[in-house]
Amino acid sequence: MLVSALLTSLGINSGLCVLFFVLYSILKKQPSNYEVYIPRLLAEGSSKRRSRFNLERLIPSTGWVTRAWKLSEEELLSSSGLDAVVFMRIITFSLKVFTFAAVIGIFVLLPVNCSGTQELDFADLSNNSLDVFSISNVKSGSSSLWIHFAAVYIVTIFVLCLLYYEFKYVSSKRIAYFLSSKPQPHQFTILVRGIPVSGGSTVSESVERFFSEYHPTTYLSHMVIRRTNKLSSLIYEAKKLYGTIVQLQSEPSQQNYRLAGFFRKKVDLIDHYEKKLENIEQNVRLEQSGVSLAEETRAAFVSFKSRYGAAVSFHLQQSVNPTQWVTEQAPEPDDVYWPFFSSSFMRRWVSKLVVIVVCILLTILFLIPVVVVQGLTNLAQLEVWFPFLKSILTITFFSQVVTGYLPSLILQLFLKIVPPIMEFLSSIQGYISLSDIEKSSCNKVLWFTIWNIFFATVFSGSVLYQVNIFLDPKNIPSKLAVAVPAQASFFVAYVVTSGWTSVLSELFRVIPLTCSLLTGCCKSSDEELDIPSVPYHKDIPRILFFGLLGITYFFLAPIILPFLLVYLCLAYIIFRNQFINVYAPKYDTAGKFWPIAHNSVIFSLVLMHAIAIGIFTVKKLPTASTLIFPLPVLTLLFNEYCRKRFLPIFIAYSAEVLVKKDRLEERDPAMGEFFDKLATAYQDPALIPIHFPANGDSQYSPLLSSADN
């Protein structure tokens, strides 16, 4: 790729950034867009709709940038939880790493690379190849390569030190967050599955008898889980039907009639839907009363009088038969994924196999856009595929757009569908909580991106060819040494196109804005405001993948670092703004996303070391290759130490912390009321009474009710 192609991509994306910033600062001031750009402030009552026209609405402003910059970590913690703090720590960690790496890369390594076999032509800068800026331009056997060797050592040690500090900091924050939190139901509750039931007794009676006998001093109450999948479908249908009725009632000017039957009789739609809703109400009542008497699963949420009592029950094997009375940590009540409990063991087992097969097929299918993208970066190949484009590609601007901007854009569009697919696959994999589903999909998206964007691009070819490379570990460093530097120009353009555009589209909220414009005229003022939560499974993998590109390419093609820093600075400001105005947490894992970030950085470092070994071997500097070997060993030993030292804190709290917290609340008079509510905290939402107005005039008569549970 030529410098001119990169400059074209840079110009297009810079223009889009400015456009998005200007449009956002104007559109967010319009009252009709408040639900898109400040839904959290609307829900909290911090902002109100203004109907009076003001000229200031049409003038771009930067006040939101200042507010986002001034947001402190403590304010973020209190308003958005520890997950939001960890998310921002991932960004600031990356900023620190690449600021340090950029100083070495831009001021030390880049001049060395540019003074290699091909000298940089400043007079005709746009026609220089980007290879001039990479390590590929350094002569084989050159003593200058020792500078790259030293840079690899220095940056590795810096990253490991910073990573240790961050892991320690987040671990301490997690404990402090727990100690300062109010009593939460999941802290006193465990999930028990595989409950054996003797003849003539129910699951509820078995749970009561077992825990009263073996945990008499700490056992408090339990809630048996029931199969409510049919009931949930009915309630969903009722809510959808009620929404239709409200929409029709809010549009009196429209013709709310239709012709039906053989004689084309005119039917009032509102009356028709209300009668249909009454029938569903009757079905819900019957189903709820039936579920309350039967349909018990062999699982229950069991609550205890102390956190320590719940922890002891969770960690102890409850039965001589390890397949019975199996315990798990209970998620927050709002975090429970209820459809999971309605699935049989066989269905969950088959689902896991299906997920594995689908992930493999998706990986193979994704090679199609990767091959297309590789063809676009090579004009000669493109002319062979599409001879009719030959005349168009001779135009400089079009060739620069096709090779510099279009490939990354196509790849980014295809990647948009990956997070929702991975989230769906994780949801059928057997997890009991929404947060576990999100963490699982976060891991899936991350490794899918690393394989399909990094390795599939670097080792462009058949699937069999890529698999064969990893089946022969001895040749991996040499293959990486040849392939990775060759794709430096593509990944530089990818950071500019995919990184900058994606983070600006997060600010502009393109999809929610489009949906709002399309459905704005149909919305009812009574409709409940939907406050989104941060899609961590989509945003964390993207940041970590760019981190991998920065770590692996900082000594190969340091020109990538300034573009990465711009992306991270944009992400830092924009996501802080979104935490203030848009996102509200629905549940909090207390920082459990950090180990994913830690593992990704360790993998990136080891990958960089493997590439460095191959590079110095190919460049005929075997001594440097040999001296690099201690680095991956040191990195893996460091990782093992962190796993022993910090990871247990993210799995379960220690007895020291639990007892300390329990003792702090022993004499709290509010604990009695909390324990009363704990008995019903894990009631299935499908069994909780739901009330709708019977018609537009009556706002208090219940249309949908439930039997006593």
Image (cartoon, rainbow, N blue to C red):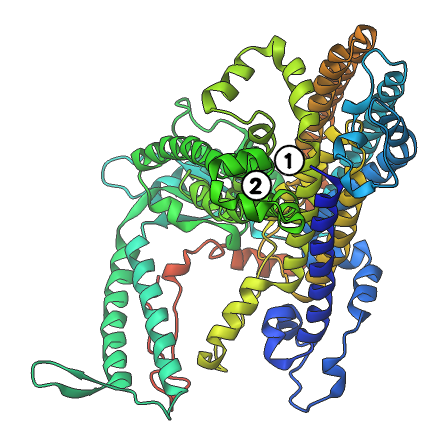
- Residue 703 visible within the image: yes
- Percent position of residue 112, x then y: 89, 26
C-alpha span from label 1 to label 2: 8 Å
Instruction: Report which quarter residue 648 is drawn in.
Output: top right
Secondary structure beneath dot 1 equals: helix
- Residue 355 lies, in percent from the top left, at 40, 35
Contact, CB < 8 Å: mark 1 with mark 2? yes
Amino acid type, label 2 = Cys
In the picture provided, is 162 more to the left or to the right than 30? Answer: right
| Along the viewing direction, whichever of 143 and 527 lies nearer the viewer | 143
| First in sequence: mark 1 vs mark 2 | 2
The residue that appears at 27% across and 55% down in the rendered structure is 293
Instruction: From this view, report whether residue 632 is shown above or below residue 176.
Output: above
Report the front residue among 237 and 55: 55
Q: Quadrant of the rendered structure where residue 685 is? A: bottom left
Label 2: which residue? 442
Residue 652 at least partly seen: no
- Relative to 451, 263 lies left or right: left
Q: Position of residue 200 (x, y in %)?
A: 23, 40
Q: Tag 2, which secondary structure?
A: helix
Give the number of marks. 2
Picture disc at residue 596: 1
